[in-house]
Image (cartoon, rainbow, N blue to C red):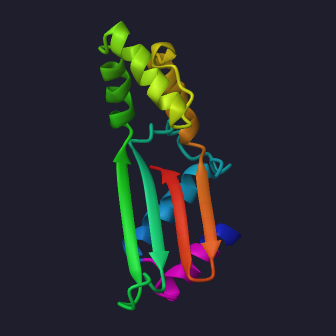
Amino acid sequence: MNEQRRQVLQMLAEGKITADEAERLISALERDQPESPTGAAFRPKSRPKYLRVLVSSEDDGTGDGPSRINIQVPLQLLRAGVRVASLIPPQALTRVNEALSRSGVPIDLAELKPQHIEELIDQLDEVIVDVDDPGSKVSVFCE
């Protein structure tokens, strides 16, 4: 059994994640494993549909005990955002870009193209972020 799978099962045993969350995490880990050399039929890798953020905390700061947050963001939302950005009139686009830059987000929306978002989404499939804190666990991944 690999180390990551054992960690997921340990979190489940400790009650830090639910059985459903453990199943999703293990499924994500299995997608990253190479095909078995036993001649299993080749299955093309499915495109991710969601960016998932899981947060488990022993104490949420209110004294009410453990808390769990499960956020599922459709990647289609990114695609729709690019299409909406292309509809912004040029005068407004300049103002939006200036406001984004002042806010610390130096993005030129005029340069944002649908193929760039598809490349980003393809790369997001490879992203798995785990943050361990003594009292909480954060996981960000695509599924």
Residue 105 place in picture, x, y as percent: 54, 34
Helix, strand or loop: magenta stretch = helix
Residue 11 drawn in magenta: yes
For this view, does 48 lie left or right of residue 3? Answer: left
| Bounds of the magenta segment | 6-17
Q: Nearer the viewer, residue 115 or 135?
A: 135
Q: Nearer the viewer, residue 15 or 133?
A: 133
Q: Nearer the viewer, residue 2 or 51?
A: 51
How many numbered marks does the figure carry?
Answer: 0
Residue 111 place in picture, x, y as percent: 51, 14
Which image quarter is the N terminus in? bottom right
Residue 71 place in picture, x, y as percent: 37, 58
Quick check: can you spot residue 2?
A: no
Q: Is residue 99 above or below residue 16?
A: above
Give the residue drawn at x 63%, y 82%. Answer: 134
Give the residue drawn at x 37%, y 64%. Answer: 70
Q: Is residue 63 above or below residue 78?
A: below
